[in-house]
Image: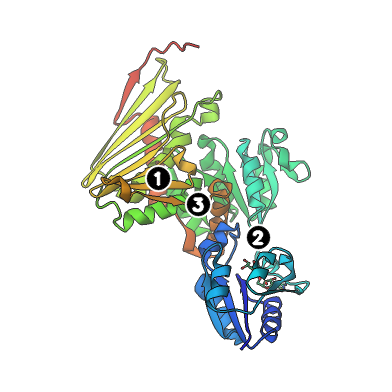
Amino acid sequence: MKKVITYGTYDLIHYGHIRLLERAKALGDYLIVGVTSEDFDKNRGKINVQQTLMERLEGVKVTGIADEIIIEEYEGQKIDDICRKEVDVFAIGSDWIGKFDYLKQYCEVVYLDRTEGISSTQIRSSNSSIRLGLKGDAVYLNKIDRECAFVNGIHVLALCSDKGADIKCFADRMQYDTDHYDEFLDHIDAVYVHSTPAEHYHDIVRALEKGKHVICESPISMRKEETAELFELAQQKNCVLQEAIKTAYTTAYARMLLLVQSGKIGKVVSIEATCTSLSKDTDAAGWNSICSWGPVALLPVFQIFGLNYLSSEMISIYNDSHLSQELMTNIRFIYPQGVASVKVGKKIKSEGELVISGTKGYIYVPAPWWKTEYFEIRYEQLTKTRKYYYQLEGEGIRNEFVSFFQNMKGKHTLAYISKEISLEISGIMEQFCTRTNTKIILEDVNEGN
Ligand code: C2G
């Protein structure tokens, strides 16, 4: 019996896939089809897959062409499969020409002509293309534009900014200044807001009132009540309102949370998160340390311990009596099950690590933990240390926009930051601004060279 094997994602299975399977099968008597797992696809940069692995397996199954279906989970698995299953022919589409020649030492390799004029990418885009506009002045918008190019179905086509010239990527696309925000909104389906924290609320209200979906760089607003109002408006208008904290969408962070929840370090009793950066434009446009770093540092605390803390204390250190030059802020939360401490600063430097301590061991995420690909679970016995690595493409921004896209399409599978957490984050911003429950330290710092 001549055995043939082929591999693919088979997302939204189409005529091109079916033709390939038929021709592969015709090369022998028995066809094995390897369907890629979600992790495998993510690792090779394929992030826009719309169907789950189960749906894709089912898609291949109903064609009735495959004699056996397996899951492709790891790099190098093809060699393993070919040897173990005594495969005679490896077949794949001509878009891979040359890439699998290394398999020739194990079996015959055949590249079959790809069917022109059809692809999953095309189907995904035509199903549902979203016109995205960017609102704000930050240079960070360049990054968003660059990363959105990897997200199928999202097209960035307009910018609304006072400093359009600084945002390099927009030379040949629509640009509006902030006086024309309403006109800008008329040209898009969804907006990414990264104006100043104080402007977020108004920018979001106007977008939602026009029925536009919103993804807003955290914090959504500086007052808990306002954020609640925005979520209500979003619901009335049937729009998505999503908080953008890119860390939440990185694979390493998401997996780390799952390991904590599954009890790998026992019961969690302490969380310490530090985020600092030294930048010249400190506090530019209201992006002080609590707005810039607070939401990301608070995220693991609220996601692991929840929101029912018994008490909290905020300590802010300033180096001027007008309280305009904040050096750093520390927030301590007391929970029934333990304590959490968050340290953020834009005029100090510290080790930007995350440590989650439990009754059996602890998780250590090295600096800069908010964009890490790597973490360790450590135990009393050093030999028991486990290291985890998950490749990070685009600092989490790509996944963030895939999640936003899926939310807009009504698939809530990737909503990582709950509304309740968004509300609590705004509450902390409010606490900082009103100095409620806050200790102030005035540090007379004479900066040396
Ligand atoms: N295909 C084709 N014609 C198309 C589209 C796809 O012949 N119009 C072929 C591809 O060449 C591939 C198979 O159908 O052989 C599955 O395609 P995808 O689902 O896009 O999977 P792909 O990313 O090519 O995965 O490690 C190799 C991968 O597993 C192959």
Q: Depth check: give the residue in front, 357 or 178.
A: 357
Where is residue 147 drawn, in percent x and y?
Answer: 63, 49
What is the C-alpha distance between the residues marked 1 and 2?
28 Å
Residue shown at the point (70%, 67%) measured from the top left: 122
Residue 176 falls in image quadrant: top right
Kind of residue at disc 1: Leu
Circle 1 residue: 299
Comparing marks 3 and 2, which lies closer to the viewer? 2
In the displayed structure, 259 sits above or below 27; it is: above
Which image quarter: residue 150?
bottom right
Instruction: Determine if the C-beta at disc 3 is less than 8 A from ligand 1.
Output: no
In the rendered view, does 324 fall on the left or right side of 157? left
Pinpoint residue 42: horizontal percent, then vertical percent: 55, 59
Q: Which residue is mark 2?
A: 153
Whichever of labels 3 and 2 marks the residue nearer the N terminus, that label is 2
The answer to whether residue 306 is visible is no
| Residue on which disc 3 sits | 242
Q: Is residue 11 left or right of residue 369?
A: right
Amino acid type, residue under disc 2 in the picture: Gly
